[in-house]
Amino acid sequence: MIRIIVLCLAGLLFSNIGAQKASSSAKSKPGTDKNAPVIDQKKMAKANALIAQGMKEKDKGKQSELLNNAITIYTEMKMAKEGNIAIGDEYYKIGDLKTATRYYAKGGKDSKVDLSKKVGDAYLEEAFKETDPKLQKKAFDNAYKNLAKAFGPLEANRMIGNQFFDMGAEQYPKALEYYGKASYMEGIYMIGDLYAGKSETMTLAAETYSSTKTKEGFKKAGDLYFGKGDYPKAMEFYVQGGVIEGYIKYATELKKAGKLDMYNTVIEIVTDTMKLQNKMDDIKEYAIAAERESNFVLAQSLYSKLGEKDLEQKYKAYGLMMRLEAIPAKTIFQQMGKEDMVADIDKNIKQLTTLQQSFLTLNELQKSVPKVSTKVNQNTGQLEYDKNDLKLRDQFYGNPATQKAISDVVYQIGKEFNAFKGNEELKGLVRQAFLKYAPVKNILDTYMFTKKIIPINITPAAVTF
């Protein structure tokens, strides 16, 4: 009896295991997904016939009924998405993109990108063919909306911009409009580069580069004008972009041109930026260079930035002497304990007073020189001096009265300098103050300040500042 019971239990156990395996096998078989399409060719043919009939129907009510019936059949086959796409395709074929979009929207997430791109491209093609501005704008808006659904707003704008770019130079402004919306800097720079290749579109190039409102864009615009020698215009863009490299390049050109005050102003801006960035060693290099070049006003300011008070005071006094302001300089020398300099100033106060007057007279004579303006040559794109201004300047220096007025002051400077008594430091500062004037260097020996050119041999070149 026990044996029979055991056998029965074993049979029951194996029966349950078999049932579980069968159930598991049934679940894993393909085609058993409740949501899987159940394709019926007859139903499919009937649904497609209804769609074809509906597309021909003029009556909107009957048309809607036929298409809804087709969708119902597709739904029975668990293919509602495919049914909507099929109807959308029919509207797409006849150019009714609005209705096509409505049906495509029900086509499911998996098809969204391809269908949105398809409609977007069609709207884009329609927009380029359209001649009515209002309808064209509407088509472009619809193209953007659909492409944005597929790829996002930035890429949609970039794609539309590319279409305009491919149409040639006349459409570059529209391409830039869309590239701007896309924040597509590479595209904007590319068009800027194309404009920069021709002198007649150089202004457009600068405007294009700067439209990015980026440091790189302003640098490109500035470099464009810098390369043409229009430094003030270049600086307009360097300033907007905070392009320190541009400031430094401009400062170098100012130094070459002898425009020391402007050079100092630019270097002050550069070193202020360096201080914010804690680049104190770089500031030190500029300070040492200013010292070496006897640019004492700048040296004083830079040593102040560096917190080196003794050198700041020293070059403040030297800077005053560069304007022959001996009394204020004497006060600083006293504070520094430089009694020898104080004594030499007192000893030579008469000569220093006369030299300061000559210094001021030279300044006024220099200011009276006719200004020479520059302008861009429309043919070459290069910056050139105005010919009429050059003619006026030549006439000024060619006037014997002008030559005498300038040379007389220079000879007076030489006379007073050679009456100096005292150490070389004070004489060296006075010498440096006057050597910034070209007529002094032309007419006098640059160390002794003795006559190098006598009055009878004075020429326009000798008195030219």
Image (cartoon, helix red, strand yellow):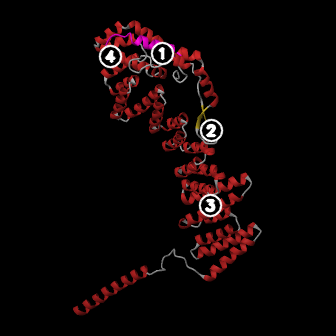
The answer to whether residue 419 is left or right of residue 90 is left
CA separation in Å, label 4 and label 1? 21 Å
CA separation in Å, label 1 and label 2? 38 Å
Mark nearest the camera among 1 and 2 is: 1
Quarter of the rendering containing residue 41: bottom right
CA separation in Å, label 3 and label 2? 47 Å
Residue type for callout 3 = Gly
In the displayed structure, 384 sits above or below 202; it is above
**Which residue is rendered at x = 41% and y = 33% of the image?**
273
Residue type for callout 2 = Asn
* Viewer-nearest residue: 438 or 45: 438
CA separation in Å, label 4 and label 2? 50 Å
* Viewer-nearest residue: 282 or 396: 396
Q: How many marks?
A: 4
Residue 231 image point, x, y percent: 53, 35
Mark nearest the camera among 4 and 3 is: 4
Residue, disc 3: 120
Q: Is residue 160 magenta?
A: no
Residue, disc 2: 377
Q: Is residue 406 visible?
A: yes
**Main SS of the magenta segment?**
helix
Q: Earlier in the sequence, mark 4 or mark 2?
A: 2
Q: Earlier in the sequence, mark 4 or mark 3?
A: 3
First to last magenta residue range: 406-423
**Which residue is rendered at x = 53% and y = 51% of the image?**
184
The answer to whether residue 263 is left or right of residue 314 is right
Q: Earlier in the sequence, mark 3 or mark 1?
A: 3
Residue, disc 4: 424
* Viewer-nearest residue: 439 or 366: 439
Circles 4 and 3 in contact, beta carbons < 8 Å: no
Residue type for callout 1 = Val
